[in-house]
Image: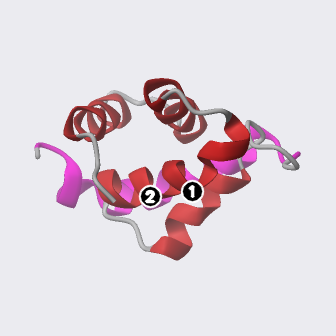
Amino acid sequence: MNFDRHLVDELRALAGAGERPCALAGVVLHRLQLGAGAGRLQVVAYFQEAFALSLQDAMRVGAAPIFPGENRPTSDIDAEMLPLLEATRDLWQGL
């Protein structure tokens, strides 16, 4: 997959400034002009690329309520994802 480097950098900057993971998923959909139904895999891939996450960890954002069929609260997804982003911060911040 070819990643938009500007989008990867934007995600890192926003996360570094405290933006929540579910909001970052929305940024990916918006920038790539994708609907939520078609964009779940791209969001997961961008999370892997931007934040040095394993596929298993990045897939957690795919359960965000912005995607069809998902109904867990945004706060739950963010609470799961924030420690994962923090754990890899040294790998992605400042790149």
Horizontal side of residue 9 vs 17, given as left or right: left
Residue 29: which quarter of the image?
top right
Check disc 1 and give the amino acid type.
Leu
- In this view, the residue in front, 65 or 2, is 2
Between the C-alphas of marks 1 and 2, the distance is 6 Å
The x, y position of residue 48, in whole percent, is 39, 61
Compared to residue 83, the image places residue 57 above or below, namely below
| Magenta stretch, residue numbers | 71-94
Above or below, 62 against 66 in this view is below
* Res. 35 image quadrant: top right
Residue 11: x percent and y percent?
Answer: 34, 36
* Residue 45, label in figure: 2
Element assignment for label 1: helix
The local secondary structure at tag 2 comes to helix
- Is residue 93 magenta-colored? yes
Q: Tell me the number on the disc at residue 5.
A: none
Identify the residue shown where x is 44% and y is 58%: 45
Rendered residue at 68%/49% (across/down):
77
Residue 7 x, y percent position in the rendering: 30, 34
At label 1, counting other C-alpha atoms closer than 10 Å, the crowd grade (few under 14, some 14-19, many 20 or more) is some
Drawn side of residue 57 relative to residue 60, left or right: left
Q: Residue at x 72, y 54 (%)?
A: 63
Q: Which mark is residue 41?
A: 1
- State whether the magenta stretch is mostly helix, strand or loop: helix
Q: Residue furthest left?
A: 95
The residue at the point 29 percent across, 39 percent down is 12
